[in-house]
Amino acid sequence: MIAAFVRSVLAEPRAPDPPARVWRDWALVGALLVTAVAEAIFRPDVPARPLATVVALVVIPVLLWRRTHPLLATAVGWGGAMVLHLPTVVDGNPDVGLYSMAGIVLLPYALYRWASGPEALVGTAIVAVPAGFGFAASATLGDVIGGTILLVAVFALGAAMRYRAVARQREVQQVRTHERGGLARELHDTVAHHVSAIAIQAQAGRAVAAADPAAALEALAVIEAEASRTLHEMRTMVGVLRDGDAPDAEPEYGPQRGISDLQELTRMSPLVQVHCAGDLAGLPRPVEVAVYRICQESVTNAIRHARNAATVSVEVTGDVGVVRLRVHDDGDAARPGAGVGYGLLGMAERAKLLGGACQAGPDPDGGWTVEATLPREMPRGVPQ
């Protein structure tokens, strides 16, 4: 079991996409540097003052690279702490360095949050050496216990945040896979519908070809249009699904809802009001289905979570080149427990795959609003 654990740790890759340095990092490092200089000038009890000052001024800026280079930052930071223990070895004074050096406690957290498995093991050993010297030089058992608990807690917090990020990423990927599976089923139904129309027109053309050549040519024109539209939608959807895995469950084919079915949402609650305006004819089937499902999910969330709501309005408008939808409730903006759901995340993913966008949040005028914009024509490229 221990061998398996060690192998799993060694196989752990670095956490992806460490965030870039932000203003808070610069503010933290700036404050620590100012504090270090002030301590070096005004603190009378700093042992090995020149050495402590130089080490602090070298180590503190390394905090800026703790996410992108966690092992190197840990080696520099805790290596500096090891250097500061040299006066302790010489004169036995347990008070080493400047208090501003306490910022290096962030390095073990960053190590377990962002580093690979092998880097974490090496970094743990690097931290253990100066920490051990510090505990050995401590005057009381309470200091040893407190310091050990603090260090272990920092390591554990970094590992916990890493696990949480991985779990979140997996949940989001599951939502993406589910939506891609839905789009694949819609592709099946769309192609089946168009091919059926092509077959019917071909049969009609054959039936009237001898008696009415003009009607046969007209049937051929319809067949050409249907075939072109089918190929376009199929290529677009296949491109969208190209980098996604097929869902594990067997697909269930059933009737797909569209814009013409939006009035059915009023049956969910007497609070729901549906209004459609503009040009909503001739939309690709995946776009119609996406409009219906985003509205359905938004209305469901409003009914479940909107407190003291009097109305839930659904507005769908066909504009030039796009279809816009807005679902708004006038209840309290708070959504207790809604953050753990992934329905709207899935709808946002569906909108993105179709070349549009979807966002939800508190409305400045009160209540909660979901807004989405979808293109009238499906994109030719692969949306990312």
Image: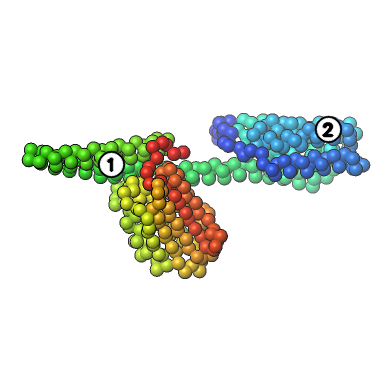
Residue 88 percent coordinates (x, y): 86, 34
User: What colour scheme was applied to this rendering of the protein?
Assistant: rainbow
Q: Residue at x 50, y 54 (%)?
A: 360
Element type at mark 1: helix
* Quarter of the picture holding the N terminus: top right
Q: Is residue 324 above or below residue 130?
A: below
Q: Which residue carries the number 2 mark?
A: 54
**Front tag of 2 and 1:** 1
On screen, residue 312 versus residue 231, left or right, reads right
Q: Amino acid at mark 2?
A: Val
Element type at mark 2: helix
On screen, residue 368 versus residue 27, left or right, reads left
Q: Amino acid at mark 1?
A: Val
Q: Residue at x 86, y 42 (%)?
A: 38
Q: Residue at x 77, y 41 (%)?
A: 30
On screen, residue 179 versus residue 149, left or right, reads left
Residue 358 percent coordinates (x, y): 47, 50
Residue 255 percent coordinates (x, y): 29, 52
Q: Which residue carries the number 1 mark?
A: 191
- Residue nearest the viewer, comparing 171 with 224: 224
Residue 252 percent coordinates (x, y): 31, 47
